[in-house]
Image: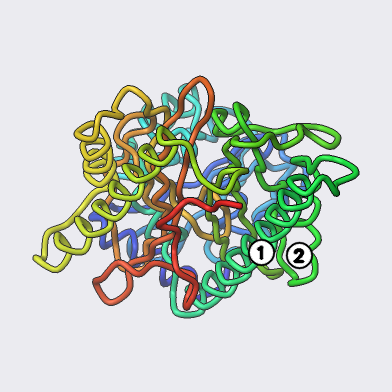
Amino acid sequence: MQAHELHDMQEAIREEGLDGWLFSNFRHRDLLSDGILGVDTGATNTRRWVYAVPAQGEPRGIVHFIEKDILEGLPGSRTAYVSREEFLAALAPLGGKRWGVHSSETISAISYLDRGTAATLEKAGLTLVSAEALIQRFRGLLDEEGIASHERAAAGLYRIVEIAWERVRQAYAAEAAGEASASLREGDIRALMLEEMDRRGLIPGHPPIVAGGANSGNPHYDFSGSGAAFKKGGVIQFDLWAREAGERSMVADISWVGVYAPEAPAAVRDAFSALVEAREGTLNFIGRELAAGRKLTGAQVDRKARQLLSDSGYGDALRHRTGHGIDTECHGSGVNIDSVEFPDHRFLLEGSCFSLEPGIYFGEFGLRTEIDVYIYRGKPVVSGGDYPRQTKLLTC
């Protein structure tokens, strides 16, 4: 951790009104603690360590004697312990203060602190508060460089969708003319997307979702081999995400949907129209509230999207939250647009980046339309540059 990172961390602590941020790990179970501090994940970690960053002043590390170098390179002092009693004694100076820790009742993605360690810290007199807002401020907000990286990745994904759907159209036309020697399959399009990502220097981390027909009703659908063949009249769902190479490169994540036919069935067309209206209505809601100077939580935004879909008659088809935070990870550390799965009461802050991806799912098909949004100069901005977000179903 560099000096400027410590400065930013302490500024975040003060903004949240806490006395400090307490990191701790055992067997590298807390990925956030290792990642934020830059602890070597290959280092032996068979004993508990603690690193306490106060709102003001010098950080303090507590390490076991036989692993006293695990926090090597981090600023501040070190205290080595051998016994549990010495560990508690080393914690004592931190008592009587409110510390942000990696624990949350609702946001599982940042909840690493086990109950036993929490009890030990509380026994030493520390007051523990969830660090969820600290994590967002320090790791889940995009600066100018991060936005530029995110936009480049988004532009690449939009172009890949164009290329992929053109391949789908060609296959349909060939089939309709009786010229196709083999049906187009989910795996063919996924392979094409991966090739295009590689050509653009984009790293997905996991292959994109390409789901045809009833498979589109599974939001996290995956397959091995070549996947299923596309059937005439069936829904085709794309969901792809990737980032540029580089430690601080930001992810983009979009979903598009179409039909393997020249025209969509009425049920699919009506459901997709409701999705677009909910997505755009939610985006407009964010803009209005922020323009009026009102703070918004991820849970409030999710409730708005759900209300719009329920008003359209699709409430029973909702199966997941409206969106997730995006940063260097696809499901990042920032605010999630979620009031039902992992209710997120953190605010949409300047630099927050998140997906808006309302989805509705039925027995025969599912639909999801996803855009990425970031807060820039107090306004919601849809990433993708000159590429328009999807408002009509793709058809052949």
- Horizontal side, residue 86 vs residue 132: left or right: right
Mark sitting on residue 85: none
Disc with the residue nearer the chain's start (1 vs 2): 1
Q: Residue furthest right?
A: 181
- Residue in view at x 57 percent, y 72 percent: 155
List the residue tagged with mark 2. Answer: 196
Element assignment for label 1 = helix
Q: Is residue 340 above or below residue 388?
A: above
Q: Can you tell which quarter of the image residue 102 is in?
A: top left
- Residue in view at x 26 percent, y 51 percent: 282
CA separation, marks 1 and 2?
Answer: 6 Å
Out of 253 and 105, give the one closest to the viewer: 253
- Residue in view at x 43 percent, y 55 percent: 392
List the residue tagged with mark 1. Answer: 160
Question: Do tag 1 and tag 2 residues touch (Cβ < 8 Å)?
Answer: yes
Percent of width and height locating residue 234: 60, 35
Q: Is residue 297 above or below residue 371?
A: above
How crowded pointer 1 is (Cα within 10 Å; few <14, some 14-19, many 20+) is rated as many
Out of 110 and 387, give the one closest to the viewer: 387
Q: Give the residue type that dot 1 points to.
A: Ile
Q: On the rendered image, what quadrant is the N terminus found in?
A: bottom right
- Horizontal side, residue 293 vs residue 304: left or right: left
Out of 104 and 344, give the one closest to the viewer: 344
Percent of width and height locating residue 253: 54, 55
Element assignment for label 2 = helix
Let me know if residue 94 appears in the view: no
Percent of width and height locating residue 351: 37, 68
Out of 114 and 216, give the one closest to the viewer: 216
- Residue in view at x 65 percent, y 43 percent: 209
